[in-house]
């Protein structure tokens, strides 16, 4: 969906900016293609940076939850050992 937007809407906007010229030359079309690719790559880099921050935050949360679960199971283990030793 996003590539269609970049290569459809953005291309038409950039070509409209050059519409004062009588005809779009191959050089201008190549410059437009390069600008579209660069802007799309910048958007992807931003998305990757955002998602990597989310992953790091979630990893920290899940590590804390795992540690908490492990520490919470110790009283149950102690109770089971105490129960089995007095049986």
Image (cartoon, grey):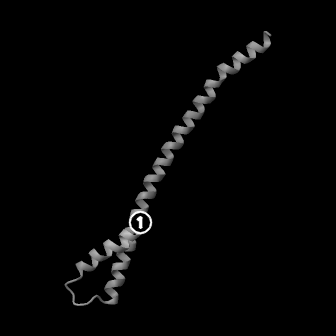
User: Is 75 placed above or below 51 here?
Assistant: above
Does residue 14 sit above or below 63 in this rendering? below
Res 65 quadrant in image = top right
| Disc 1 crowd, CA 10 A, few/some/many (<14, 14-19, 20+) | few
Quadrant showing the C terminus: top right
Looking at the image, the residue that sits furthest to the top is 86
Left or right relative to 16: residue 81 = right
**Apparent side of residue 3 relative to residue 66 in the rendered image (left or right):** left
Which residue is most to the left?
20
The x, y position of residue 27, in whole percent, is 34, 87
Which residue is label 1 attached to?
Answer: 1
Q: Quadrant of the N terminus?
A: bottom left
> Residue 2: x, y in percent?
40, 65
Residue under the point 23% across and 78% down: 17
Which residue is at the front of the view, 46 or 87?
A: 87
Residue under the image location 70 percent in, 18 percent down: 78
How many callouts does the rendering have?
A: 1
- Vertical side of 48 occupied by 70: above or below: above
x, y (%) of residue 6? 36, 70
Residue 48 percent across, percent down from the top left: 46, 57
Point 65% across, 19% down: residue: 75
* Res 15 → quadrant: bottom left
Q: Nearer the viewer, residue 44 or 9?
A: 9
SS of the residue under disc 1: loop
Along the line of sight, the residue nearer the viewer: 71 or 14: 14
Residue at position x 28%, y 88% in the image: 24
Q: Is residue 10 left or right of residue 2?
A: left
Q: Quadrant of residue 25?
A: bottom left
């Amino acid at each position: 969906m996003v590539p269609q937007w970049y290569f459809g809407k953005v291309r038409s906007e950039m070509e409209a900016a050059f519409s004062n010229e009588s005809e779009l030359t191959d050089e201008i079309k190549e410059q437009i293609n390069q600008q579209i690719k660069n802007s799309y790559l910048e958007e992807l880099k931003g998305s990757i940076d955002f998602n990597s921050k989310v992953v790091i935050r979630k990893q920290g949360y899940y590590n804390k939850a795992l540690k908490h679960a492990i520490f919470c199971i110790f009283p149950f283990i102690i109770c089971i050992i105490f129960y089995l030793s007095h049986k």
